[in-house]
Image: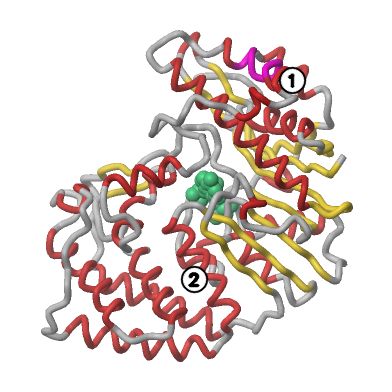
């Protein structure tokens, strides 16, 4: 398989990009930057990535810039785009499938576009919520129907009641829509810190040693940050919006005539991380799922990068003109999957991921401007263990699939090595790949 990857890589220009990108493929600076800091997404890229890419591509001098992020997450691209809009007229669009992350990114971009008067609305709204919260008013504080919330080791009962009372107080208050959504974002961003659960990058884990924080204090601090950031914000001339939907198929949401100068995204990596799971407590807390069935359907709507649900074993590429080329690409990877009890799930993951990426590149190709670029950030991952360990080189796999969708691979820039004790493969890495329309 290493030979297969070597051969693939030799077809393109591959460079060491660690100097520019090592710190930008992770959320460097996000927790200190206004607006970005409102919800910390561990899997985000840096607030500085977009400006760096614009410079690299010599796009900063353009009078107008149309940007699309198909996997908007916490909205890093969109907020960064709005922040550059003092130099360029920006129109940025994001697509996000997770209802909670959509809520977060949407509330951030609406706040940035609302301007400084929002600070006043937030201050008034917070005061109203506080009055209700401390009153004797009987607010509805039923816990969400997710068993995690009824585990007293995870959520100490008094803190849970307080969290639920904050949410109810926001919902009962009469507030302008943007202020209300922001206060809900602030409330949801206290869920993890008010519990003994910790997101460790792969899953939500029980951390018995953790001292949960008092929700009202956490909430007040978050709202205080929002007031400070909106008060100090410059009014932006840029436009940004987020759509709740499937980023693999942007043409479902965007007309083919609405060309983009830059499509930039970091998709879920094929490393088994399931965003629906990782951000489930916040999503249930805000009422985005009412029962287990809705939660399961949400998982089915996500990119096939994880085996949390059994996706159908059907692949569009198999009935397309590219089926032979995709098979040539995938066969050596599929052959490296060890024959153990995970084999079927792993093969499905590889085929499903490739199928989704091919669809995505085809859609994006139709909306890219003739001088436009597509930039993706992706990490490769190791699966299995011991002698049976194998690497899914998503950067190379995606580059080949992009070619099949009529893109030219301009450069694979290796941002950082992820080498672990378990493997020495140089393909275990995270890359920034630039494509142009062929
Ligand atoms: C690596 S994160 C993106 C983080 C983003 N770049 C940021 O800085 O916040 C990948 C995102 O893809 C989302 N996602 C998964 N499947 C999706 C789909 N089918 N359509 C759109 N978004 C999806 C996940 O919910 C997650 O937010």
Residue 355 in picture, x, y percent from top left: 61, 31
User: Quadrant of the image for the C terminus?
Assistant: top right
Establish if 228 lies above or below 413: below
- Reading the image, the residue beneath label 2 is 107
For residue 267, which quarter of the picture? top right
Look at the image and give the residue range highlighted in magenta.
327-333
Answer few, some or many: residues within 10 Å of disc 2's Cα (few below 14, many 20 plus, some between 14 and 19). many
Which residue in the rendered view is the most extreme toward the front? Answer: 319
Asked whether 383 or 24 is in front, the reply is: 383
- Which residue is painted at 71% across and 80% down in the image? 237
Residue 239 lies within the magenta run = no
Asked whether 167 or 39 is in front, the reply is: 167
- Which residue is painted at 52% across and 64% down in the image? 105
Could you tell whether 208 is left or right of 221 in the image?
left
- Which residue is painted at 58% across and 76% down in the image? 112
Mark drawn on residue 325: 1
């Amino acid at each position: 398989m290493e030979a297969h990857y070597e051969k693939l890589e030799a077809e393109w220009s591959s460079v060491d990009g660690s100097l520019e990108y090592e710190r930008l493929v992770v959320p460097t600076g996000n927790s200190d930057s206004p607006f970005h800091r409102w919800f910390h997404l561990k899997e985000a890229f840096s607030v500085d990535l977009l400006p760096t890419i614009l410079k690299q591509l010599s796009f900063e001098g353009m009078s107008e810039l149309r940007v699309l992020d198909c996997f908007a997450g916490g909205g890093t691209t969109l907020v960064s785009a709005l922040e550059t809009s003092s130099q360029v007229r920006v129109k940025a669009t994001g697509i996000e499938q997770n209802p909670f992350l959509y809520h977060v990114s949407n509330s951030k971009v609406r706040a940035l576009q609302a301007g400084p008067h929002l600070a006043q609305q937030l201050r008034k709204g917070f005061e109203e919520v506080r009055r209700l919260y401390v009153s004797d008013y009987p607010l509805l504080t039923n816990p969400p129907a997710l068993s995690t919330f009824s585990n007293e080791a995870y959520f100490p009962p008094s803190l849970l009641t307080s969290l639920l009372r904050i949410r109810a107080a926001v919902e009962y208050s009469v507030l302008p829509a943007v202020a209300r959504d922001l206060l809900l974002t602030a409330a949801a961003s206290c869920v993890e810190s008010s519990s003994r659960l910790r997101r460790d990058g792969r899953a939500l884990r029980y951390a018995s040693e953790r001292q949960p924080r008092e929700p009202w204090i956490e909430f007040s601090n978050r709202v205080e940050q929002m007031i400070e950031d909106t008060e100090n914000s410059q009014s932006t001339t840029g436009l940004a919006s987020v759509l709740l939907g499937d980023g693999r198929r942007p043409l479902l949401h965007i007309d083919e005539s609405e060309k983009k100068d830059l499509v930039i995204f970091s998709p879920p990596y094929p490393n088994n991380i399931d965003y629906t799971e990782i951000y489930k407590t916040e999503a249930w807390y805000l009422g985005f799922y009412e029962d287990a069935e809705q939660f399961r359907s949400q998982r089915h709507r996500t990119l096939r990068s994880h085996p949390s649900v059994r996706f159908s074993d059907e692949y569009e590429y198999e009935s397309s003109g590219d089926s032979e080329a995709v098979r040539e690409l995938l066969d050596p990877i599929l052959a490296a999957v060890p024959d153990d009890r995970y084999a079927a799930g792993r093969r499905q993951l590889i085929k499903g991921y490739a199928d989704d990426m091919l669809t995505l590149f085809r859609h994006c190709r139709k909306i890219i401007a003739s001088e436009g670029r597509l930039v993706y950030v992706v990490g490769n991952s190791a699966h299995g263990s011991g002698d049976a360990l194998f690497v899914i080189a998503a950067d190379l796999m995606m580059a080949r699939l992009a070619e099949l969708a009529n893109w030219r691979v301009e450069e694979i820039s290796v941002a950082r090595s992820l080498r672990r004790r378990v493997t020495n493969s140089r393909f275990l890495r995270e890359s920034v790949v630039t494509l142009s329309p062929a």
